[in-house]
Image (cartoon, rainbow, N blue to C red):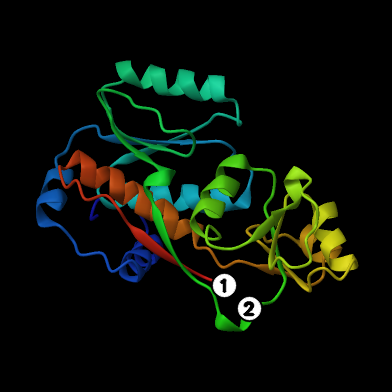
Amino acid sequence: MNNGNISSEKKHKVFKAIEELNYIPNDSARNLASVNDTKRLKLIIPNINISCYTELINGFKDGAKLYNYDPLIEEYSNDLQKYKIINDNLLVTSEIKGVVQIGPKYIISNKKIVNLNDLLLKVDINEKYYNQKIGIFFKNDKILTEFFMERIFVNYNIVDITKKEKIDSSKEYYLTQTVEQAAFLINQGITSRIYTLEKTSELTKLIPNILHIPIDFYAIGVTLSRMVIKKITNRLDESQYLTLKI
């Protein structure tokens, strides 16, 4: 923390994320993490070019550096064979102490592993949106789509347009993965608003009333780094909550 590898501004941002998560510092973990040896954490991620993942990477890096771990990032470009090879190669890499996987759960016998699916999200949906038809737009990233669908909208009746389901006007939520599908919902008057994880000028131009879901991917990155460090330092309660407000 005091090694100068992270700027004051970054420290403040990390501490802010920790404060929002109600994190209580653990002295034994802090002392163990201060040993001056080569300690690295690896983040295996499907795509570094999606803005959500860019923020997650930044949070992961800063969270790792906070406890003097060297963060490494490796992209598998949504290629599951490459993903397997990356994980297998870690078996012979002693300096990497822990791994965060944004992908299928993959056990590496000599590494501490945290998977995105180990992270829990508490969802707070504003009451004013109940009983209103809302569209949810996810860009073509299977990992993020499945993660958020399983945690956010698991208790809601959803028409998955991405699977060519017939539009049912009695449903309240609609899932889309292309701009064309999202625009169709708006143009046909099926829904008056579309929510998205992505916040780009292109989407705003094509769908003027698209709204960004305020998910703090930076905080998710910080949290995942802390979860794997807790495992390395034998503090095994790795479940963490983030609150998502819609």
Taking depth in this image into account, of 171 and 151 the one nearest to the observer is 171
Image vertical order of residue 157 relative to residue 68, above or below: below
Residue drawn at x 22%, y 42% as measured from the top left: 231
Specify the quadrant of the image occupied by residue 157: bottom right
Quarter of the image that includes the N terminus = bottom left
Which residue is drawn at the image coordinates 24% and 32% (left, top)?
38
Instruction: Please state which of residues 92 and 116 is positioned toward the viewer in this rendering.
Output: 116
- Marks 1 and 2: which is nearer the front? 2
Q: Residues within 10 Å of mark 1 (few under 14, many from 20)?
A: some
- Residue 232: image quadrant is top left
Q: Which mark is residue 129?
A: 2
Amino acid under disc 1: Ile
Secondary structure of the residue carrying numbered label 1: loop
Residue assigned mark 1: 246
Q: Kindly identify the residue that appears in the image at 49 percent across and 62 percent down.
A: 216
Residue drawn at x 47%, y 18% as measured from the top left: 85
Residue 68 in view, yes or no: no
| Cα distance in 3D space between marks 1 and 2 | 8 Å
